[in-house]
Amino acid sequence: MLKIENLKVKTKDKVIIDNFNLEIAPGEIQVLMGPNGVGKSTICKAIMHHPDYNIVDGKITFNDHNLNLLDTTSISRLGIFLLNQNPVEVEGITNAEMLRTALSERNDTKVDVFTFNKKLNEVCDLINLPKDFVHRDINFNMSGGEKKKNELLHLFMLEPKLIILDEIDSGLDVDALKVVGTSLKKYYDMYHPSMLIVTHHSDILKYFDQYKVAIMDNKTIVKTGDKSLVEKILKTGFGASVIDGSEEYE
Amino acid sequence: MNKLILAEDKVIKDGEYEIIWDKKLNIDCRGNLKLCNYSKEDHTINISLTDNSEVNFDKVSIINKDLTLTFNLNNNSHLEFNYLIINEGNNTVTININMLENNNKAKIKIRCINKNKDNSLNVICNGYVNKSSKDNELTEDLKGLILNADLIKISPNIYVDTNEVLANHLVTIGSFNPEELFYLTSNGLSIPSAKKLLLESFTTNFITEEFKERILLEVKNIE
């Protein structure tokens, strides 16, 4: 599904990612962890072709589409969805307006208003989101928790095949984390998407049974493993012993 | 909203009106007023708020010549002026806010765009706070959206001749916010659709809903 080969990413002439390789199979959950500032969020933005991040070497493919050659719109329409740790506020454009435009453009046909509204209502019920969110400006004047829930509305409406979660659990209180975690699990159970979860914590991971883990350091992946690697890191931190394996990793 | 056609200098008292005028005029506002005006052929107007008046004025100008709007606030008056300028040609719009005496509040919000890439707009917003006046508050929030190679110049001038005043201004001139564009495109919108929604939001979001359809028609073909 997603394949990243020998990726090198620059921003403002500074190399942030180098020799980065990662594969995520259909339905697979890949967790990406690492100390602050090693480039985890850069990977998320590079996949979506954020204008500040330049891919100077390497290749990203998604279901045989070379993402290096595509713009952000096309990448999104292939079914890739980025859920940011701090989603942008867009004053004056409602969720409904954006989603209606996105769906009608993607499907190249005018969205049936009845079907669209019905689905919006169903999604709001499914993720326990007040229905007035549909007509609120995108993330505008929302708390951190509300913004994440608002993003879930977009997720369920756009039905992506690959979800990129960039520190979705940062800044969430216990209740908001529960809503976000259970909603993501519902989505996973319904659609079996691939997921790339960037996180510092294990809180969001407890909602998923199986996942692979990769640790980033110095612009690239330095260690991979299964969920037990997360437990190790939570105990000992990202110290050299975990990364180079000098402390036994079970 | 009732339409009020102003043929000569006039006093307007409490109420909600869409006002229309076709020559230079002086208006006295008294009491609690909600006014709006949508003009394709604008003319200079001087609006005075008598003591204890509260005026909320939403205005849209499609301008093709220079224009001056003046507001005079005396005592205990509140003015909220929301103004959209859609410019055609090379024009200057001057807005004067005169805080003449005490305890007035004026919130001026202006949004402006050029209709064509070779247009040039100069907006001058002058706030004057008189000597020996007290407890006045003045806020100028002015934004210009550059759509092409057009030119927008905004001068937020605040002339204060007293110590007891709260005055501030915020000015931004620029193109579409790249983070907003990235966000919308990463949700699947094409660049033209994202820009269209952002332009519609910029021009209609702060002004009375009554003008929305007319504004959207006006900006529809701007690229």
Image: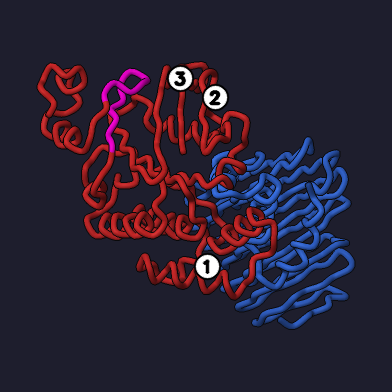
Q: Residues within 10 Å of mark 3 (few under 14, many from 20)?
A: some
Q: Residue at x 45, y 45 (%)?
A: A162
Pair 2/3: label in front: 3
* Residue B14: percent from left, percent from top: 65, 82
Q: Compare marks 2 and 3 and give the one earlier in the sequence.
A: 3
Q: Are marks 2 and 1 in contact (CB under 8 Å)?
A: no
Q: Amino acid at mark 3?
A: Asn
- What residue is pinned by disc 3? A6
Q: Colour of chain A?
A: red
Secondary structure category for the residue under label 1: helix
Q: Amino acid at mark 1?
A: His
Q: Which chain is blue?
A: B
- What residue is pinned by disc 2? A54
Residue A153 falls left or right of residue B194: left
In this view of the protein, which residue sits in the foreground, B65 or A69? A69
Q: Residues within 10 Å of mark 2 (few under 14, many from 20)?
A: many
